[in-house]
Image (cartoon, helix red, strand yellow):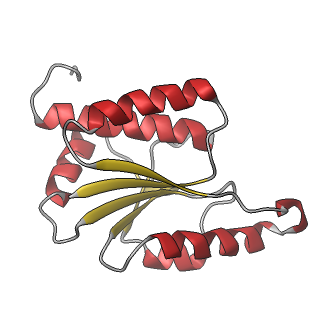
Amino acid sequence: MKICLLVVGKTNDALIEQLTDRYVSRLRHYVPFDIEVIPELKNTKAMTPDVQKVREGELILKAVSPADHVVLLDEGGKEWRSVEFAAYLDRLQTAPARRLVFVVGGPYGFSQAVYAAAREKLSLSRMTFSHQMVRLFFVEQCYRAMTILRGEPYHHE
């Protein structure tokens, strides 16, 4: 199964991008993995948060297919320890979907249409992180999960 991290907007911090790329490179030794970027909307100052969520939602929904297993990275989602996340990924790798898509929304979250299209929600923390940091944390956790599944010494308990 291919894993995709679908994100709204580019990373504008070179250090975070460099670290994210490092973990993506490591992760690809275990599983096909890509980050897909949906361009940020233009003229968002003229939009209400609800309009912005709907417009971003339309772009997110164009980027996924009905056959994808879509998981939203959302503050209201399930929280797991790293070993539990590893077990979750292990279970999903045997699922019939060819692509597992984790989605990071825009600054105001997701539209109702995106929530309806998702199979589940996952929270990285009860704290709020920048969208750029979420990318790094998520990719590192995916890498950590793969090393846990292989019994490699990256993760310590």
Q: Residue at x 45, y 50 (%)?
A: 123
Residue ID at (54%, 32%): 17
- Asked if residue 36 lies left or right of residue 78, the reply is right
Name the image quarter holding residue 85.
Answer: top left
Q: Which of the 4 image quadrants contains residue 109?
A: bottom right
Left or right placement of residue 82 versus residue 113 in this view: left
In the rendered view, tell whether residue 73 sits above or below residue 99: above
Residues 41 and 151: in front is 41
| Apparent side of residue 68 relative to residue 90 in the rendered image (left or right) | right
Looking at the image, the residue that sits furthest to the right is: 46
Q: Judge whether 131 appears above or below 114 on screen.
A: above
Residue 119, placed above or below residue 16: below
| Residue 152 drawn at (x, y percent) | 13, 24
Asked whether residue 111 is in view, the answer is no
| Residue depicted at 63% across the width and 52% down the height | 9
**Image spot of residue 128 (x, y percent):** 61, 42
Q: Position of residue 59 (x, y in %)?
A: 59, 71
Q: How many marks?
A: 0
